[in-house]
Amino acid sequence: MALSVAEGFETFLNRLVPLASQRQAAAKHRASIETSLRNALDVILFRETGSFTHGTGVRNHCDSDLLVSLRNTRPGSSDTAINWIKDALQKSFPYTSIKVSRPAIIAAFNNGTETWEIIPGFITAGGGDKYSVYDIPGAASGWIQSAPVAHLNYVNTINAKKTAPGGAKKLARLMKAWKHYNNVPMSSFYLEMRAAKHMSTQDVFSPIWDVCWLLEALVSSSLANMNDPANVSGRFYACSSESKKAEALSKAKTGATRARKALEAYQKGDNGLAFYYLDLLFGGKFPARS
């Protein structure tokens, strides 16, 4: 029997969830990373962040993120803090690829199949508790604010809405899948927060509608900077440069057009055409109808 659009999305979302084995493989390096950095730097605490922790990761496109809260006085240049982390890791793991991809330093273990992204941070408010705000390196230069626990709490709160349980994280996962399968140079964190903010205004979650509405909203705003919906840190940026923003906006326009055509076909009862455009939207990864 041919899948309905709702069944297609359910199957797709199940396929997007990272495997437990992938999470376990990545996690085994955390202790050695922490030991390396504690030996080289004055560390207050480590906090795991990112899509694995948030439950919004996409299978095979999901790194483990580790925020390193440093006691040192924050240097004027974020490059200095990045190099502190990079140098410590290179000394401890001379045969592992260690490279900078702002705001993180990427440690690619086991030929890149078990990857950690490590970000230096300096507490600016909150004193180390769950509401702490950190200065972390900006995507291109300088410093930006981050409040990982407050932002996770925000996503969890929206995700727990009784009328749309699980909707915020499912929409975030779908948007990240769109990003990865179409090579869109856009921040996954930005997409996650946009998805949660969108779902905060919705009474139900319907992926065929919400993906379309969110893509169209991104295009309408021209990927505008986003105010922090948790009201604890600075604004969020969609892309790390104007050239990447132009590319991302172009791909968002294409995605919004395909999502709208899929929705229109769905409304007309033409599921075959809806599946066709959904497959285009998600880079050929959407489930076949039958």
Image (tube, helix red, strand yellow):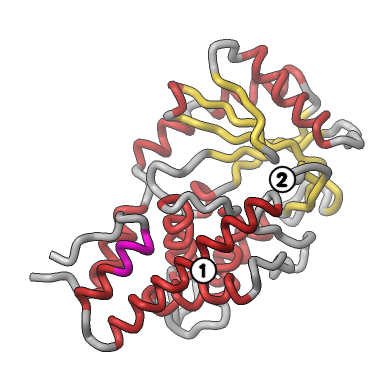
| Residue 185 x/y as whole percent | 57, 50
What residue occupies the far left of the structure in this picture?
A: 1
Q: Residue flagged by tag 2: what amino acid is it?
A: Ala
Quadrant where the image shows the C terminus? bottom left
Where, by quadrant of the figure, is residue 77 drawn? top right
Q: Secondary structure at mark 2?
A: loop
On screen, residue 202 above or below 29: below
| Residue 119 x/y as whole percent | 69, 37
What residue occupies the far bottom of the structure in this picture?
A: 268
Quadrant where the image shows the N terminus? bottom left
Residue holding disc 1:
253
Count of numbered badges drawn on the protein: 2
Q: Nearer the viewer, mark 1 or mark 2?
A: 1
Lateral position of residue 194 relative to residue 20, left or right: right
Residue 264 within the segment the image draws in magenta: no
| Residue 149 visible (yes or no) | yes
Distance from Cα at disc 1 to Cα at disc 2: 23 Å
The one of 175 and 259 positioned closer to us in this rendering: 259
Lateral position of residue 268 relative to residue 27, left or right: left
Lateral position of residue 172 relative to residue 187, left or right: left
Q: Residue at x 82, y 46 (%)?
A: 143
Q: Which numbered disc, 1 or 2, marks the residue that appears first in the sequence?
A: 2
Residue holding disc 2:
139
The one of 2 and 91 positioned closer to us in this rendering: 2
The one of 236 and 151 positioned closer to us in this rendering: 236
Main secondary structure along the magenta-highlighted residues: helix
Q: Residue at x 57, y 65 (%)?
A: 155
On screen, residue 150 above or below 275: above
Question: Which span of residues is magenta-colored?
Answer: 277-282
Q: Secondary structure at mark 1?
A: helix
